[in-house]
Amino acid sequence: MENSGLCIDKQCMCPSNKTGINCKINQCPNACNHHGFCSNNLCICESNYEGIDCSIRICPNKCSGNGICDLKSYTCKCNDGFYGEDCSLKQCPNKCSNNGVCIQDKDNAYCKCNDLFDGIDCSIKLCLENCNNNGNCINGNCVCNQFYTGDSCSINKCP
């Protein structure tokens, strides 16, 4: 059986890319620097490393193309409108004005507004029961027509 190394004093001396008794087992460069695993003499790197020997540290998911990698801390500085460890999450408009929750779907983020708030960023205050069609809603307060009163213009004034 042919081997791939040199035998010196009954010890097999393998080339740097081989290992084992007969130097037949392929070995990855630099043992993938302990940042990946070897498969068919190729390094499969952990998510924050790349290169033929997993020696190049990178930011998570390369900041998803939505930010800049800080090469001192290897953290992402996200562009406006994005957030998350790898800048893969979209921010909702105006962070839903703290009047709703941000819902993420595949490509977008949108606000689901709390009760009595509306608009793409939940910044519009609604009125109780839409002022019962007996007044106008102004900044979340009903301004009742002359014959109605109450928080929602539901009380009929006596003539």
Image: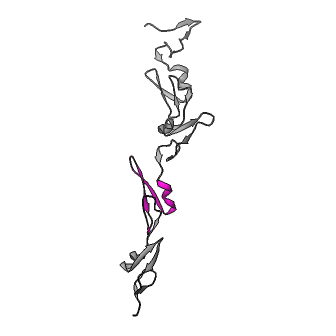
Give residue 3's position: percent from left, percent from top: 47, 8
Q: Quadrant of the N terminus?
A: top left
Front one among 137 and 77? 137
Front one among 24 and 33? 33
Q: Quadrant of residue 144?
A: bottom left
Front one among 23 and 17? 17
Front one among 42 and 152? 152
At 51% across and 38% down in the image, what residue appears? 63
At 55% across and 37% down in the image, what residue appears? 68
- Asked whether residue 83 appears in the rendered view, the answer is no
Give residue 40's position: percent from left, percent from top: 43, 21
Q: Is residue 135 above or below residue 94?
A: below
Which residue occupies the extreme right position in the image? Answer: 72
Which residue occupies the extreme bottom position in the image? Answer: 159
Q: Quadrant of the C terminus?
A: bottom left
Give residue 57's position: percent from left, percent from top: 56, 30
At 49% across and 63% down in the image, what residue appears? 99
Give residue 30's position: percent from left, percent from top: 55, 21
Q: Quadrant of residue 16?
A: top right
Task: Give the magenta-colored segment's residue range.
Answer: 93-118
Q: Quadrant of residue 132?
A: bottom left
